[in-house]
Image (tube, rainbow, N blue to C red):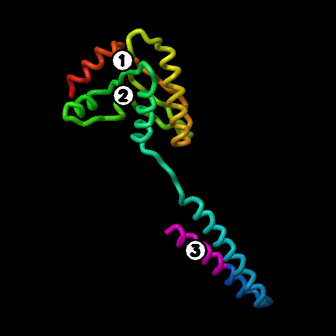
């Protein structure tokens, strides 16, 4: 449809040029051919621009959240993710939510701000976990999507032993 609009614009320009040429008594056939050729060049340039702008690659927030969640789970001493009430309800019905504990915001300049809620192992050094999560998430998002991370916000929701975490998760199954 955009192509037709561009053709209509070119046709209007062509008709206008021909009308001007018809009014002038000394216009030759060569001049008319030149007017037509110039108009066709304009249409061709518009076609090329339209072809270039038709391609796009977008990611749903869910895809970005899933990459972030999986990358976070790879970090040592992160025992699990802490979700909201909706995630809890989904788990009660047997649905596993891989994005639990993660939200993302895409900025106007296509950078990503990541918010992560985790449960960490008792005795682990939280600032080191933060650094590891930030590095892993940034690396995975860049490698898989090409997106740049504008910020990582890590919220530690709980500190428990691996045994306690195992006990809690086995009760839900």
Location of mark 3 (residue): 7
134 vs 52, left or right, is left
Q: Residues within 10 Å of mark 1 (few under 14, many from 20)?
A: some
7 vs 109, nearest the viewer? 109
User: Relative to 92, is 49 on the left or the right?
Assistant: right
- Which residue occupies 52% across, 54% down? 56
Query: Which segment did they paint magenta?
Result: 1-16
Sequence-first tag of 3 and 1 = 3
Residue 40 to residue 143: above or below: below
Give yes or no for contact between labels 3 and 1 (Cβ–Cβ under 8 Å).
Answer: no
Q: Which mark is residue 101?
A: 2
Image location of residue 126, percent across then percent down:
46, 14
Secondary element at image label 1: strand
Mark found first going from the N terminus, 2 or 3: 3
Q: Position of residue 18 (x, y in %)?
A: 68, 83
Dot 1 or dot 2: first in sequence order is 2
Whether residue 11 is in magenta: the answer is yes
Q: How far separated are the C-alphas under marks 2 and 3? A: 51 Å
The reply to whether callout 2 and callout 3 are in contact (CB within 8 Å) is: no
Q: In this image, 46 relative to 106: left or right?
A: right
Q: Quadrant of the C terminus?
A: top left
Circle 1 residue: 157
């Amino acid at each position: 449809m955009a192509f037709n609009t561009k053709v209509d614009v070119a046709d209007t320009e062509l008709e206008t040029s021909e009308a001007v040429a018809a009014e002038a008594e000394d216009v030759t056939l060569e001049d008319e051919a030149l007017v037509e050729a110039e108009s066709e060049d304009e249409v061709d340039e518009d076609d090329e621009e339209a072809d270039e702008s038709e391609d796009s690659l977008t990611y749903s927030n869910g895809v970005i959240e899933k990459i972030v969640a999986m990358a976070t789970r790879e970090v040592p001493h992160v025992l699990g993710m802490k979700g909201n009430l909706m995630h809890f309800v989904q788990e009660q019905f047997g649905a596993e939510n891989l994005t639990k504990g993660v939200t993302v915001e895409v900025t106007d300049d296509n950078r990503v701000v990541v918010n992560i809620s985790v449960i960490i192992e008792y005795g682990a050094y939280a600032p080191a976990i933060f650094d590891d999560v930030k590095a892993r998430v940034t690396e995975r998002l860049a490698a898989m999507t090409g997106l740049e991370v504008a910020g990582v916000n890590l919220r530690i929701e709980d500190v428990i032993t691996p045994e306690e975490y195992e006990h809690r998760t086995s009760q839900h199954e």
